[in-house]
Image (cartoon, rainbow, N blue to C red):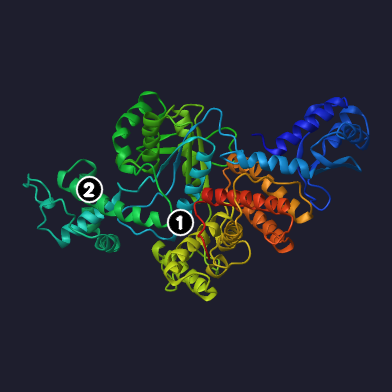
Amino acid sequence: MKTLLELITIEMRDAFAKAGYDEELAKVTLSNRPDLCEYQCNGAMAGAKKYQKAPFMIAEDVAEHLKESTYFESVDVVKPGFINLKLSPQCAASYLNEMAQEEKLGVEEEASPKTIMIDYGGPNVAKPLHVGHLRSAIIGESVKRIMRFKGNRVIGDIHLGDWGYQMGLIITELKKRQPELPYFDEEFDGEYPKEAPFTIGELEEIYPTASAYAKENEEYREEALHATYLLQNGYRGYRAIWDHIMNVSVADLKKNYERLNVDFDLWKGEADAQKYIPDMVQMLKDEGYARYDEGALVVDVQEETDNKEVPPCMILKSDGAALYDTTDLATLVEREQDYQPDEVIYVVDKRQEMHFTQVFRCAKKTGIVRPETKLQFLGFGTMNGKDGKPFKTREGGVMRLENLIREINEEMYKKIMDNRTVEDSEAERTAQIVGLAAIKYGDLSNQASKDYIFDVDRFTSFEGNTGPYILYTIVRIKSILAKYQENGGSLDGLTMRPAENVYEKALMLQILKFNDVFEAVYEETAPHKLCAYIYELANEFNKFYHETKILSEEDQEKRSGYIALLVLAKRVLETCIGLLGFEAPERM
């Protein structure tokens, strides 16, 4: 189903052609002056020089061929040559009725679906999730859902940090505390215990203790580095400890991500890429891509058009150790071998942009990925507190993610109980649903690349541009539809009628924008535009609600038309929040 903007553009192209002008001038956009019109075309100005004619005259010629169009209620030419368009109520109602019949509200799936991998999440194992992990998870999950909605094969990969120095630190600290464990006995050749020698709580305490001690004690640090080396070279006992760390950590991570309504198709990490590194390094040497620079193996990625220095991509340090560049390149080797993705999107902190510029260029230059493979860096800004600095606990530490979620849920619970609209038994679950919307919408309503202030009071408000306000609007629609059914009405077979007042038409026009907005969100990988759209839609519905007798309308045909409009508004809102990664409760 074509978007309405596409259909109007086709109509406008036809009018330009009939008037004797180039069809390419017929670009139609949503009006930036909705008080004057709903759509506009400024092509006459662009055509003035080509046709040596006043733009007003060109616009009048085109408008003459739109007089009989069923799309428009009015076509006005305004000096110096704007064509202002108002949609006919009949056209709006007809399009909405067609949209209501479509499973995806008229969104056309890709004719040739792509395989897209999204690298998001990226936590280090053995550490608790904190607020710094929030944005990658929330943005990545929404991008995954948006890409899937267009019919693509989308694979989400958490890409765990599971193979570095932190593992050596944990092993060393565990050996210091429990040297009698069989993992540290070189003579042991039996089966290692199936149960981990630590809980998740103990594991999360072990790492920072070891990290702090290593900074003060050089001998301990050297032991941890050696333990890392042994692990990475297959030492059996340390590999068994690594397996325990992974099992305990991943189980806890899954529980925490589930609270965010975030899930991954792959739970791979840096460790999975290790086996691809030796052959990749050999290829880079054999093909002449890599060179030695002060003992380190590097690939030059500077390009002539660069206006600033782009350092070489470092493949191996002078001591032969691999780096993040190496692991990320090897992960691309693995992804190419297993999935042949058409596109890989990295949802990571924007401060890593240079790293990914180097990796992407190296991957393209060396043939690690195909020339047509799109590698996209979706860098996000910092989540800050009200003081404008990175979000911290009251004590000044980094806040654990589960504590932030708990704080939001408690705030929502208080507000729900103050309103007394939900039974006590239902209030806690409702608070969790609304709390998640507050967190996700609060994040996603900002352009990903920008820093933003995480304001608990504002994000949990039922008024303004917030998640709870969006959900409150959906719940209000649900309530009206439920009352309609309680009074004997059916939601089946309803059709929308041409709008009879400005509030009804404004709501219809906002719903009509869904397909055009979604296409922009999809093309630009921009969930914040979806948030802006549903905020406007919620506002238009609430104006309509306050100015219109819906259930008390005596004209049955008119009343059923209103209900049909509400059914579609609810579907659009619920589809959008589903794409953003949250849902609406039944009551609030």
The quadrant of the picture occupied by the N terminus is top right
Disc number for residue 243: 2
Q: In terms of secondary structure, where does tag 1 sit?
A: helix
Disc number for residue 535: none
Circle 1 is placed at which residue position? 134
Q: Is residue 293 visible?
A: no
Quarter of the image holding residue 276? top left
Name the amino acid type tagged 2: Asp
Give residue 189's position: percent from left, percent from top. 7, 44
Residue appearing at x 40%, y 31% in the figure: 339
Q: In terms of secondary structure, where does tag 2 sit?
A: helix
Q: Is residue 27 above or below residue 554?
A: above
507 or 55, which lies in front?
Answer: 507
Q: CA distance from mark 2 to mark 1?
A: 26 Å
- Relative horizontal placement of residue 295, taking residue 540 as reference (left or right): left
Name the amino acid type tagged 1: Leu
Quarter of the image holding residue 257? bottom left
